Image (tube, rainbow, N blue to C red):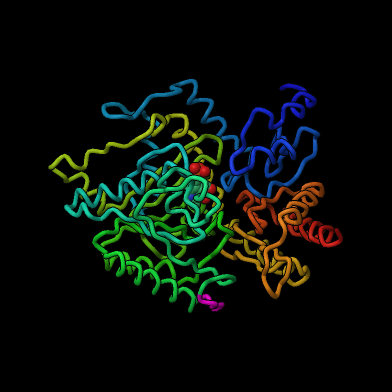
């Protein structure tokens, strides 16, 4: 490794960082992470902190998962790459597809289409949704519906169904035919409704209304996260996703669950859809499928969709989509090892227990700190604290204050993520009780420190 002087001198000079203004990176060069172990990361100055971000919602098993590292190394030796485009396959991807169809059987999902990450998985789902309707003889179903506050990655399709202006405006015009429904976000919503069950019904009515307005026979799919993640951790009322499922089924609209964050245990259940008792038509996954150790993803496809494609005799079902790295053998080997560790450690159970601990701890911070306007979570290991400058008006906190809380927490030993006015906690699912307590204590200290400034 180059020495620390070199790294600090070069930091952000020749890299444009995702989701960052290039001038901001130059003025405030990013933390340089050079090592990690367990649930902790170490920076270039040797400062070690608990990673309460979990990489980027993906390092569910922590940074020291030996079976996954070994599987990657062994696969690199045996077969570092071969494509699975028409006519070839590899042993790792075949084995993985069998593991995945067993894992997702309770969700009714039986086929896998492999990708290189979350945005690819979303794009693949949207494209397959349109193709499905064409194969079935309803080519007019091309539109997509989604939730405001939703995040579906940054490819043009995903950006078009995204529900946050930050990821849209600079890249407009986006794909036509994408329409958005209010999110079941009790803290802020156009109905001024704070009761989660009533709000869920209002959002469902808005969905019905939009379908009637657009015409059901023009809509291919509705895409949603079972718990809105990057948009600020917004768990819906338990009636919401089942309500969406019912409405979609009634109108012949496919339901795509974007489980890039929620699949593989984060919600406390093995999938977010299963958490709400819903079987989607497709499920976009990535991130934890390889624990972040290799860029990889999979779209899981329902049996009824698979039949439509596989029984097609017109040729329309030929898939004109895929990536050089679809089914990459090293990614597949990593995923096989990850799935085994994920199930062996029953990480969903720890996600539920430690997630509740973090949520309750965050509620304590809401009671204590004026700057915390809302706390959301309670569905596994995903928690957000929404910071405000005034509790009465709910005016969002100044960006600099949120940054200060993050800095103070980092100095005191915990990395948290700031996204707009939200502090987001999404640690590895193997987090211990003691580390969860440290995260809350450290945030308490940081919020107190920021209030003094
Ligand atoms: C729900 C959801 N969908 C899609 C994506 C995009 O995934 P990627 O960044 O791997 O392209 C993300 C990333 O955070 C996500 O949270």
Q: Position of residue 205 (x, y in %)?
A: 39, 74
Q: Is residue 193 magenta?
A: yes
| Residue 297 in the image, given as x and y percentages of width and height | 44, 41
Find the residue positioned furthest to the left.
Answer: 313
Q: Is residue 8 visible?
A: yes
In the picture, residue 58 is in which quadrant? Answer: top right
Residue 171 vertical position relative to residue 4 in the rendered view, above or below: below
Q: Nearer the viewer, residue 220 or 278?
A: 220
Q: Residue at x 59, y 71 (%)?
A: 187
Residue 324, image x, y percentages: 39, 29
Determine whether 251 is above or below 295 in the image: below
Quadrant for residue 328, please give it: top left
Which residue occupies the foreground of this view, 122 or 360?
A: 122
Q: Which residues are magenta?
A: 191-196
Please give left or right for residue 182 compared with residue 26 in the image: left
Q: Nearer the viewer, residue 248 or 220?
A: 220
- Give the residue at x 69% y 53%: 432
Asked if residue 340 can be seen in this view, the reply is no
Q: Residue at x 56, y 49 (%)?
A: 345
Image coordinates for residue 225, horizontal then vertical, percent: 47, 57
Report the magenta stretch's main SS: loop
Q: Quadrant of residue 349?
A: bottom right
Magenta stretch holds residue 429: no
């Amino acid at each position: 490794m180059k020495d620390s002087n070199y790294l600090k001198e070069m930091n952000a000079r020749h890299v444009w960082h995702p989701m960052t203004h290039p001038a901001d990176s130059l003025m405030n060069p990013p933390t340089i992470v050079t090592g990690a172990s367990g649930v902790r990361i170490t920076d270039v100055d040797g400062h070690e902190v608990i990673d309460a971000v979990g990489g980027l919602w993906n390092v569910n098993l922590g940074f020291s998962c030996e079976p996954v590292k070994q599987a990657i190394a062994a696969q690199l030796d045996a077969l570092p790459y071969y494509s699975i485009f028409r006519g070839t396959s590899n042993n790792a991807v075949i084995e993985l597809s069998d593991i995945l169809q067993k894992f997702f059987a309770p969700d009714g999902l039986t086929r896998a289409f492999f990708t290189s990450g979350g945005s690819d998985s979303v794009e693949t789902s949207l494209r397959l949704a349109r193709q499905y309707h064409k194969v079935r003889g309803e080519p007019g179903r091309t539109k997509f519906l989604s939730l405001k506050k939703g995040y579906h990655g940054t490819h043009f399709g995903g950006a078009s169904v995204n529900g946050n202006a930050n990821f849209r405006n600079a890249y407009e015009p986006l794909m036509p035919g994408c329409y958005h429904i209010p999110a079941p976000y009790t803290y802020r919503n156009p109905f001024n409704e704070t009761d989660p069950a009533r709000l869920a019904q209002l959002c469902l009515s808005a969905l019905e209304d939009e379908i009637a307005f657009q015409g059901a026979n023009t809509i291919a799919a509705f895409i949603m996260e079972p718990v809105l993640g990057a948009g600020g951790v917004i768990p819906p009322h338990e009636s919401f996703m089942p309500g969406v499922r019912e409405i979609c089924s009634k109108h012949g609209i496919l339901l795509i669950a974007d489980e890039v964050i929620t699949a593989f245990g984060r919600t406390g259940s093995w999938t977010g859809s299963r958490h709400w008792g819903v079987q989607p038509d497709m499920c976009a996954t990535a991130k934890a499928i390889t624990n972040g150790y290799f860029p990889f993803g999979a779209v899981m496809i329902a049996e009824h969709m698979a039949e439509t494609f596989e029984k097609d005799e017109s040729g329309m079902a030929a898939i004109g989509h895929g990536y050089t790295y679809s089914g990459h053998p090293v990614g597949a080997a990593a995923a096989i090892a990850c799935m085994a560790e994920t199930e062996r450690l029953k990480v969903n159970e720890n996600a539920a227990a430690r997630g509740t601990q973090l949520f309750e701890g965050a509620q304590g911070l809401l009671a204590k700190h004026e700057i915390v306007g809302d706390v959301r979570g309670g569905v596994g290991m995903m928690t957000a604290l929404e910071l405000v400058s005034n509790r009465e008006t709910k005016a969002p906190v100044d960006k600099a204050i949120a940054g200060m809380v993050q800095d103070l927490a980092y100095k005191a030993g915990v990395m948290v993520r700031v996204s707009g006015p939200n502090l987001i906690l999404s640690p590895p699912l193997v987090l211990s009780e003691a580390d969860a307590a440290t995260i809350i204590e450290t945030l308490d200290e940081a919020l107190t420190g920021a209030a003094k400034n």
